[in-house]
Amino acid sequence: MEKDKILIVDDEEVNRIILKNIFEEQYEVLEAANGEEALALIDEYAQSLVVIFLDLMMPVLNGFGVLEYMSEKEYMNRIPVILITGDATAESQEKGYDYGVSDIIHKPFAPRVVMRRTRNIIDLYASRREMEKQLEERTRKLRESEEKLRNSNEFLVNALSSVVEFRSLESGEHIRRVKFFTRIMLKYLIKYFPEYQLTDEDAELIIRASSLHDLGKIAIPDAILLKPGKLTPAEYEIMKQHSVYGSELLERFKQDDNQFYRYCYEICRHHHERYDGKGYPDGLKGEEIPISAQVVSLVDVYDALVSKRVYKEPYTNELAVQMIKNGECGVFSPKIMECFDLAKEDFFCVVDVLDTCNFI
């Protein structure tokens, strides 16, 4: 079995011999008479070195030069260094510790003491490496689990949203466009309105959650959902319940109250709320409306205007923008309207050349 290696760096041969005699039964001992020789050996055997004994005062390159090199190459985090010195000052010892040396041993050496202190340091570093290895493995497994869960959630979201699309006979592009538009809006919102404290990770969750904004339409009777004309006031009141039905469905099947679930719930329940409080189902107003729902609310309105429905032909992009700005589809926040003004050209691209745009 190959022995672990230690490196003794000292220009005095007698010191190297003494240390070699202490450790050669247990370790393969490498020797260097100056700092330059040491650097070559460190680079070659970095993966198998368990400790370095380093003298400070040497020709060609002194001990501090070796420590500087090891710090730059990030060897100090993996290989313990023990300074060996006969007359180190308090200043030089402090400088050594600043570099991250593990211990300082003074000449002449007491073999048993040197052996015990060295073993303790080697064991400490070995334990730390093992803990780091276990942590990396646990982190890897956690990331794999999160990825599997994310893929599973993505599949369920896509499946549920496709059911809604199928039932309502809307264009199969509706959910894709809602996701495109949501991504574009969030890009401007994050850039120009940092007060919402949305991160890129939040944006990805909101984009995925936007697919479920109309989940509650599953519970709307076909006679109302598929009616090829204007709804009566009574029918409209039933249609408005889809936001409640959707949030209730999510609540019923909730497994974990995480951020993705909260965005799904907010969007599903509140994407028909309006900034002036005249929306539904809860009559929220202003910033009471979650920002995720505010974004999807405008996106959903825009796509409904520019898309063909059983009850209408599509409006032009320009007319849809004008209707939203005129408040014909309800009132949106000034910040959301500012983002919409910045995003509208991107929206036009999605509508006109969906297959060639690459926003998602």
Image (spheres, grey):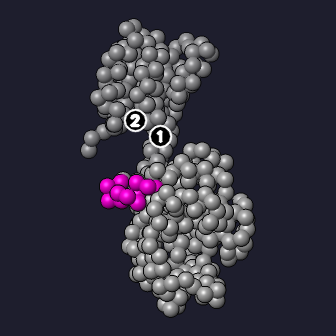
Image vertical order of residue 279 relative to residue 194, above or below: below
Q: Tell me the SS state at disc 1.
A: helix
- In the image, farthest residue toward the left: 1
Q: Which residue is mark 2?
A: 50
**Residue 111 x %, y %:** 47, 27
Q: Is residue 49 left or right of residue 112?
A: left
Badge 1: residue crowd in 10 Å (few <14, some 14–19, many ≥20) = some
Image vertical order of residue 25 relative to residue 313, above or below: above
Between 13 and 193, the one lying in front of the other is 193
Q: Tell me the SS state at disc 2.
A: strand
**In magenta stretch: residue 353:** yes
| Dominant SS in magenta | helix
- Quadrant of residue 244 in the image? bottom right
Asked if the residue at tag 1 contacts the one at tag 2, i.e. Cβ–Cβ closer than 8 Å, the answer is yes
**Residue 78 x %, y %:** 43, 36
Image vertical order of residue 25 relative to residue 279, above or below: above
Amino acid at the residue labelled 1: Tyr
Who's the residue at 40% across and 28% down the image?
73
Q: Which quarter of the rendering shows the C terminus?
A: bottom left
Q: CA distance from mark 2 to mark 1?
A: 8 Å
Between 250 and 140, the one lying in front of the other is 250
Q: Is residue 99 left or right of residue 126?
A: right
**In magenta stretch: residue 77:** no
